[in-house]
Image (cartoon, rainbow, N blue to C red):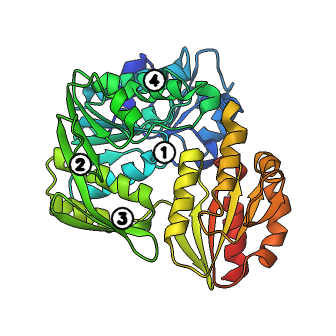
């Protein structure tokens, strides 16, 4: 694989630092995890990365990218510094230049829900193909996308690039770096509405991906989501997909999922492109993501039977609707993130599963702005429909609306996860099916860990 080298980095930054020219460029932004030979990029966040340059070099970093005014005061360290005007701007621009040097096709993925699961299924569909690379984990922001590109070798055939957004302009910026020639918006729903301001702005922001590929590439469109359909209006080449018949007004290509069924574990199986797919991941959102992956794989020349087999064998990432066993307790760990749409989908998944007693541990959904109260209230009101026996609700927003809600489901309300943890051993019983879900900032992965420790 031909990755960018330190020589390439020196040339692009006009640096005269004493570095091994042919050493591959491996970028790290965390001095605590630096590996020998990596290049530490001194970015500013809650802490200024320049505070950790010396630590990174002494831990084995081959080089560090810093602002021009920085000096470690040690000639041995200063000789390994690459000075730029602004490390963040340099990261963006260097990633853009490397992307321009790549000959591969690029798929952009965004959406209010389902983008990481869709990325994972899509990558799985290409499992036996050489030269397919994708965003690692959730590296999907203004830092993660450049890092993904700089980790892509020159001989790559396809780059699957997940893109996150919190405001208008974010996706347009990421597209200017990743240069996708095809794009998929998985869904447009209430998420980050505090920063976007409205659902209309969410549609405008997510739709920037479709705007970018409108004249130069292919748009993959979930036709059951009318906001996605509307956002893709200007796209010249479109391929739709869904579990309904092709819409009468949809004149482009279409992939239909048929015979959708769910087993006792709420895992879907369905037929697409003549092949049956049997998922190991529970829930309707997983089925939608798998159908999207099939559609994308077909467009890129993957045989339907190969894609179906690979997708059927795929497993979810930790914290994303992954099913775990702790003794006689079954846990649906969906603690990674949450918004109103994904919370509704998780409760629907729970309702599809056959189990004795269903328990939910739900935390606040963050960054919803003005719609926060009504969104949390609607979640609480869904508990009865999902067949939930006991709901453990955590966080100030959940606590506020739950206190005034009238539901048949038994409620236990806690302002913080710290207050809830000691009670879980009494509230959760052997044989229970437990769903854990909240925004990542609520740290409900701690609840998953506590249940595993107590019942395993």
**Disc sitting over residue 204 in the figure:** 4
Q: Find disc 1 in the rendering and name its residue.
A: 113
Is any part of residue 275 visible from this angle? yes
SS at circle 1: loop
The first of marks 3 and 1 along the sequence is 1
Asked if the residues shown at circle 3 and circle 4 are in contact, with their CB atoms under 8 angstroms apart, the answer is no
Look at the picture and state if 330 lies above or below 418.
below
Q: Write down the quadrant of residue 254 in the picture.
A: top left
Is any part of residue 365 visible from this angle? no
Q: Find disc 2 in the rendering and name its residue.
A: 295
The first of marks 3 and 2 along the sequence is 2
Q: How far across and how far down the image is residue 110, in percent?
A: 42, 37
Label 4 CA crowd tier, 10 Å (few <14, some 14–19, many 20+): many
Q: Residue at coordinates 65% horizontally, 52% vertically from top-left?
A: 379
- The one of 299 and 406 positioned closer to us in this rendering: 406
Q: How far across and how far down the image is residue 133, in percent?
A: 32, 46
């Amino acid at each position: 694989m031909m990755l960018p080298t330190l020589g390439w980095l020196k040339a692009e930054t006009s640096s005269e630092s004493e570095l091994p020219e042919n050493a591959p460029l491996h970028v790290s932004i965390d001095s605590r995890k630096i590996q020998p030979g990596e290049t530490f990029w001194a970015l500013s966040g809650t802490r200024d990365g320049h505070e950790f340059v010396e630590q990174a070099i002494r831990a084995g970093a081959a080089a560090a990218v810093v602002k021009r005014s920085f000096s470690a005061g040690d000639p041995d360290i200063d000789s390994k510094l690459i000075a730029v005007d602004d490390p963040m701007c340099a990261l963006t621009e260097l990633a853009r230049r490397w992307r321009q040097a790549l000959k591969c096709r690029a798929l952009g993925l965004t959406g209010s829900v389902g983008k990481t699961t869709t990325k994972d299924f899509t990558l799985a569909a290409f499992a036996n193909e050489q030269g397919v690379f994708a965003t690692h984990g959730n590296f999907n922001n203004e830092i993660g996308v450049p890092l993904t590109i700089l980790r892509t070798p020159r001989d790559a055939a396809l780059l699957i690039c997940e893109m996150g957004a919190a405001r208008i302009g974010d996706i347009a910026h990421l597209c200017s770096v990743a240069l996708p020639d095809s794009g998929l918006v998985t869904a447009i729903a209430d998420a980050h509405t505090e920063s976007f301001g409205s659902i209309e702005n969410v549609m405008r922001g997510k739709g920037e991906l479709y705007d970018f590929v409108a004249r130069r590439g292919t748009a993959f469109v979930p036709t059951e989501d009318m906001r996605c359909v509307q956002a893709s209006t200007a796209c010249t080449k479109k391929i739709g997909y869904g579990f309904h018949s092709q819409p009468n007004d949809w004149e482009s290509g279409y992939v239909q999922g048929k015979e959708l069924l769910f087993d006792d574990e709420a895992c879907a199986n369905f037929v697409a492109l003549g092949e049956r797919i049997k998922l190991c991941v529970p829930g309707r959102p997983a089925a939608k993501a798998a159908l999207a992956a099939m559609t994308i794989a077909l467009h890129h020349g993957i045989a339907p039977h190969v894609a179906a087999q690979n997708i059927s064998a795929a497993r979810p990432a930790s914290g994303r609707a992954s099913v775990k066993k702790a003794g006689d307790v079954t846990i649906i760990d969906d603690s990674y993130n949450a918004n109103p749409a994904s919370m509704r989908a998780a409760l629907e998944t729970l309702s599809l599963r056959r189990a004795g007693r269903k328990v939910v541990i739900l935390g606040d959904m963050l960054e919803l702005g003005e719609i926060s109260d009504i969104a949390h209230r609607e979640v609480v009101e869904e508990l009865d429909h999902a067949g939930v026996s006991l709901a453990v609700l955590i966080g100030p927003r959940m606590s506020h609306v739950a206190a005034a809600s009238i539901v048949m489901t038994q409620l236990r309300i806690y302002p913080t996860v710290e207050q809830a943890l000691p009670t879980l051993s009494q509230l959760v019983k052997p044989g229970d099916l437990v769903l854990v879900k909240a925004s990542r900032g609520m740290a409900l992965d701690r609840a998953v860990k506590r249940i595993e420790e107590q019942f395993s």
